[in-house]
Image (tube, rainbow, N blue to C red):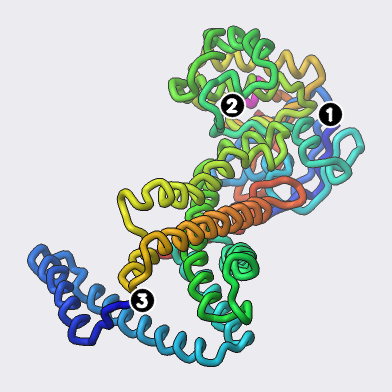
Amino acid sequence: MLVVENIARKPLEPVSLEVPDGTCIAISGKSGSGKSLLLRAIADLDPATGVVSLDGRSRNDMPATEWRTKVTYVSAQSGWWYDRVGDHFEAPDIAATYLKRVGLDPQAIDWAVSRLSTGEQQRLAFVRAIVQRPRVLLLDEPTSALDPEATAELEGLMHEKLGAGTSIILVSHDPKQAARMAPEKQFVMEKGVLSEKGRAS
Amino acid sequence: MSYEALDYYDIGLAALLLGINAALSIVYKLGVAKRLLIAAARMVVQLSLVGLVLHALFETVSPWLTLLVALIMIAFAGRESMARQDRRFAGLWGYGLGTGSMFAAAGIVTLFALATQFHATPWYDPRYAIPVLGMILGNTMTGVSLGLDRLLSEAANGRNAIEARLALGHSFRDAIQVPRRSAMRAGLIPTVNGMAAAGLVSLPGMMTGQILAGVEPIEAVKYQLLIMFLIAGGTALGVFASVSFGVTRLTDGRQRLRLDRLITSEG
């Protein structure tokens, strides 16, 4: 279980969360409200105050690299550092088996990054993160550049990972997606303040 | 050894060539006339002052005065190098990182040269120490500025790629590998190109000066080779030190990318 206690960084007000294994919580809110900042702070990519732990073990008791392998952030803007797609994966063969599942040509593993569309990059970045089998996925608008069909495929993979015990914090601007992925726990971020959505609807 | 001493009339005549620059600026409205005038005036004043300082320095041969002049030169090189960077570290680091690297690199190589190749007595004789330091420093400064500028701009522009690697659990050392390599290369390339073109495209200034001053070309070439090797060593040390410290300062104990430590130069 991922436990976040009073994590804060300007302009984010202190946030506390509990995400049990195999569950998904969704966060929506306007751009600039601090959703990405929260995910980055949990991944330890920005300095923040507060305590974050996984299965009772504080992240400060392990190297940052180990923490991020377990609690992996997938940014809305994917990053690439080599020319060939496959060079970005630790196990390109395993990655290739996932490509079809997200509607990509398995040959894409040999493509040049420069010929990828934004939507292709987004799906490859998602696959890149899940093949490392993290315990927690911090997903920042993972389907913003995808059509409904590809979105459904990606959500299918997310459900599969949830079933295998991975937990997910999903940032999404789409309320329907939030309802599909996290029917029980939905939050709204407003000007750095996170609040749980009422179940009135 | 014989050479033609210049009188001020000769120099004034050559200065008339600046009129070409001025005419170009006025005819094509380049707007550089004022800056040209200031730059030319600065050059005349600065070089004349340096001439006076060196004259006095060579007369006294004091180790402390030599050291003082060396430190002042390094301090100015640090300022110049900082001004050439579009991005730099905030606070004292912005100045200290490049300056410290140049101090170490140019200092080590100058001492090496004074201790081995130049058999001056005393070894700190400013007639040798100051010109050698000046030549090494000038080139090391170029390398350090280019290296740091490249490192910081690639770190900022390549933020998505670097943080994607960090997010996947890569170490900062791995994540910064591509920008670091590119920065080191940028810092070293001018020296490599300078060596490759020496003699064919350009006659190096020092060698030209020695030949004009009546030194045998073969002897002048030997001096020039020595200086080129010293420059190559100083630049390599300076680029390595500044890029390495820069990489260290770009991250922290939790292997984050700390772009918040950078500021962008205005204008």
Q: Considering depth in this image, is A132 or A72 the residue closer to the camera?
A: A132
**Count of marks, rendered view:** 3
Q: Which mark is residue B1?
A: 3
Asked where in the image residue A1 lies, by quadrant, the reply is top right
Give above or below for A48 relative to A96: below
Kind of residue indicated by mark 1: Pro
SS of the residue at dot 3? loop
Relative placement, left or right, of A36 versus B157 is right
For image coordinates 58% across by 58% down, the residue present is: B238
Give the quadrant of residue B171.
top right
Circle 2 sits in a helix, a strand or a loop, which is it? loop
Q: Quadrant of the C terminus of chain B?
A: bottom left
Distance CA(mark 3)–CA(mark 1): 88 Å
Q: Which residue is identified by label 2? A: A142
- Residue B212's x, y, as percent? 31, 70
- Labels 2 and 3 share a subunit: no
User: Magenta part mainly helix, strand or loop?
Assistant: helix
A157 within the magenta span: no
For label 1, the crowd category at 10 Å Cα-Cα, with few meaning under 14, some 14 to 19 and many 20 or more, is: some
Q: Residue furthest right?
A: A56
Decide: few, some or many residues near mark 2? Use Cα within 10 Å; few <14, some 14-19, many ≥20: many
Visible in this render: residue A105? yes
Residue picked out by circle 1? A20
Q: Name which residue type carries label 3.
A: Met
Q: Which residues are magenta?
A: A176-180
